[in-house]
């Protein structure tokens, strides 16, 4: 008599976390990030779409309540490379932004502010749902090379070169003015992450992410695998992390003894905290290296 073999059923991602912690705690950091991203996007769109000008401009350069200037330091760097003398307000705005991300965490911009993260997260979720595997992921250093290229091209052309194709700017422009080219660039990022390279744009190509990673080396906000002894190797954290290579040193003690994730590529998105049913991870500061 032949033995009947029942096919293994794929374990739903995060099912244990929802069962053990409840739906809210299994999605808390994700929901907080979405609130931050959508709230900031709404502030920028209120002016052109509803005539309520709380914030004027976009993430490249803005003025809040007619008094607080904020400027992307990468924009200022491109302007300087192009040979343009920045306005005093741009210098002040860049200094404020630079100080914030140096202290709090460079790649918090990528996971808590950048609206393109909504696009790449959607591509990653659809990729998992469709069961797509593999892909052609470029070397992680590619985005640093592209950052250098952006500055060189700005110097050669006398323009703020990245703004011609920046998906963040294009998404703002598409939402306000429409336009096929703007939506086309946003769609290209989605398709690239979905069909070509998993987490390819943010993790391997985006020069803005490379720039903010450079600012993240002194960041105070960190994720810690402070209960790593409880890890059951379910691998859910690696599946949802946009930069999974940052987890192993802290979780498995490879190359370090403490449980802090100190890699500047970490976006402090908190998804590893949400997805873990064993509460292995926690949001903390770089000064807390204890285990519990």
Image: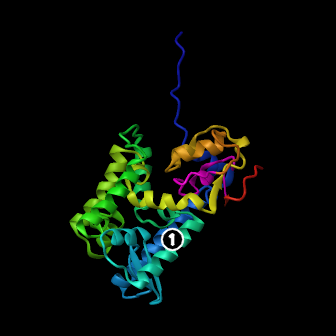
Q: Where is residue 107 in the image (x, y as percent from the top left)?
A: 51, 60
**Does the stretch in magenta take in 277?**
yes
Q: Residue at x 52, y 36 (%)?
A: 10
Residue at image point 46% right, 70% down: 38
Farthest residue in the right direction?
292
Circle 1 packing at 10 Å, graded few (<14), some (14-19), many (20+), is some
- Which element type, helix, strand or loop, lies under badge 1? helix
Identify which residue is drawn at 48% across, 61% down: 212
Q: Look at the image and tell me whether residue 160 can be seen.
A: yes
Judge from the rendering whether residue 70 lies leftward or rightward of residue 24; answer left or right: left
Q: For the point 23% across and 66% down, which residue is it?
A: 157
- From the image, give the main secondary structure of the stretch colored magenta: loop
Magenta residue span: 261-283
197 in relation to 83, above or below = above
**For the view shown, which residue lies furthest in the left direction?**
180
Residue 289 coordinates in the image, percent (x, y): 72, 53
Closer-to-camera residue (97/43): 97
| For residue 168, above or below residue 122 | below
86 vs 248, nearest the viewer? 86
Identify the image quadrant of residue 102: bottom right
* For residue 14, above or below residue 269: above
């Amino acid at each position: 008599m032949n033995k009947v073999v029942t096919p293994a059923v794929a374990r739903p991602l995060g099912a244990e976390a929802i069962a053990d912690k409840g739906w809210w705690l299994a999605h808390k950091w994700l929901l907080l990030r979405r609130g931050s991203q959508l709230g900031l996007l709404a502030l920028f769109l209120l002016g052109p779409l509803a005539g309520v000008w709380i914030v004027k401009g976009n993430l490249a350069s803005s003025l809040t309540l007619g008094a607080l200037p904020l400027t992307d330091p990468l924009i200022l760097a491109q302007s300087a490379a192009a040979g343009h003398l920045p306005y005093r307000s741009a210098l002040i705005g860049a200094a404020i932004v630079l100080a914030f991300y140096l202290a709090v965490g460079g790649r918090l911009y990528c996971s808590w502010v950048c609206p393109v993260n909504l696009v790449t997260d959607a591509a990653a979720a659809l990729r998992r749902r469709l069961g797509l595997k593999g892909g052609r992921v470029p070397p992680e250093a590619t985005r640093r090379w592209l950052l250098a290229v952006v500055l060189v091209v700005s110097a050669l052309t006398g323009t703020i070169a990245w703004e011609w194709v920046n998906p963040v700017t294009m998404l703002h422009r598409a939402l306000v003015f429409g336009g096929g080219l703007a939506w086309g660039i946003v769609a290209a990022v989605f398709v690239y992450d979905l069909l070509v390279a998993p987490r390819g744009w943010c993790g391997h190509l985006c020069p803005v992410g490379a720039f903010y990673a450079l600012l993240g080396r002194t960041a105070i906000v960190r994720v810690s695998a402070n209960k790593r002894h409880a890890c059951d190797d379910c691998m859910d954290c690696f599946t949802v992390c946009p930069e999974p290579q940052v987890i192993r040193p802290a979780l498995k003690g490879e190359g370090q003894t403490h449980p802090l994730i100190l890699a500047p590529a970490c976006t402090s998105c908190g998804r590893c905290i949400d997805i873990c049913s064993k509460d292995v991870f926690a949001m903390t500061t770089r000064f807390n290296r204890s285990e519990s």
